[in-house]
Each structure stands twice: as C-alpha cells, then as structure tokens.
Amino acid sequence: MGEGSGLGCQAPGGGEAVIKRPLAEQFHQKVLDGTKVSTIRPNPWPVGVPIQLFRWEDKPYRSKHVNGPIVVVNCIRPMQISNDPTNKPQYCYGHGSLLDVVPKNLYTIEGFNSQEDMDTWFCRLVKPSQTIYQYQMLFSLIKP
C-alpha cells in the first residue's frame, strides 16, 4: 500500500500501523464473549482487515487509549434508522426504496441487553421524524 494509506505504514517504533476504532466500555466484555458480533456506524470499516478496538482511559479524545480486542469485519450491510414522531426507532437494511426489515434479535448481536436499551442508544442519534444512514459491520474476534 502507498505511504499514508494507514495499512502497511510504519508505526512509531517500527511496527505495522494498525486501524483503531473506539468501543464503548459497556460492550468490551460482550465482544470478548462473542455475544456482540456487530456494530452500526456512519462509515463502513474495511472487510478482512484486523481492527484494534479501544476505549478511552478517561475523557474521549483527551486521554489515552486502553486497547481491547482485535476483530475483523466479515460483512457490511447498509442500514437506515428512522425515528417516528413517538420516538420509536425503526431499523431497516438497505438505503432508499430497497429496504428489508432487520431480524428481531438485532439488539442481541449489537450487544444490548434489550430492544429498549438499543432504542434509547439510537434515539440520541436520530431525532423524532428523522432518518440516518449507517452501516452494520458483522465481525469476528481474532485476538482477545
């Protein structure tokens, strides 16, 4: 890969640069246990590339990274998340007019304890009567 690509570049100290992505502390153990095998984000992660998950030691962007598990993305699905006027999110695979309903257990593979917990999480991102476009990445643990 070319210089500055983020893959194959030399990291400080001579090692390979690694892609790092934040993971909320509440999900760390669930990734390690294999119960959280998916994440929904605004931008897709690369498929087949090791990704080091981390949490912040203290305040985000103002503290050190605490490294967590390393995962690899196996599959990416575009998603549309809409929030109806009653503040109840609706989750669909696809974008635009080609939409499929997500499985009932989406909250489980996302690492939430209940559908209500997942809805509360996404209500912070999607205001009532709005729609956002995200990507679901299905991943597997390659190194705890």
Image: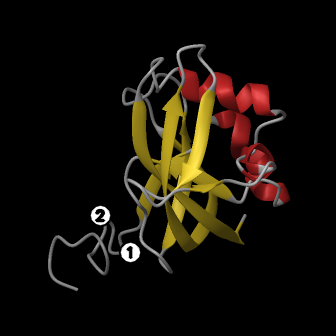
Q: Is residue 119 left or right of residue 77?
A: right
Q: Residues within 10 Å of mark 1 (few under 14, many from 20)?
A: few
Q: Is residue 1 left or right of residue 42?
A: left
Q: Tell me which residue sits at (56%, 73%) in the image.
A: 75
Question: In the rendering, at what x and y percent does residue 70 appear?
Answer: 61, 65
Instruction: Find the residue positioned furthest to the bottom.
Output: 1
**Residue under label 1:** 15
Mark 2: secondary structure? loop
Q: Residues within 10 Å of mark 2 (few under 14, many from 20)?
A: few
Depth check: 14 or 142 in front? 142
Instruction: Find the residue positioned furthest to the top.
Output: 86
> Label 1 amino acid?
Gly
Question: In the rendering, at what x and y percent does residue 19 appear?
Answer: 41, 63
Question: In the rendering, at what x and y percent does residue 122 appear?
Answer: 57, 29
Q: Tell me which residue sits at (44%, 21%) in the image.
A: 129
Residue 17 picture quarter: bottom left
**Residue under label 2:** 12
> Label 2 amino acid?
Pro
Depth check: 2 or 40 in front? 40
Q: Gap between marks 2 and 1, in whole Å? A: 7 Å
Instruction: Find the residue positioned furthest to the left.
Output: 3
Quadrant where the N terminus is found in the figure: bottom left
Residue 68 is at least partly visible in this image: no
Mark 1: secondary structure? loop
Depth check: 70 or 82 in front? 82
Q: Tell me which residue sits at (78%, 57%) in the image.
A: 32
Q: Are marks 2 and 1 in contact (CB under 8 Å)?
A: no
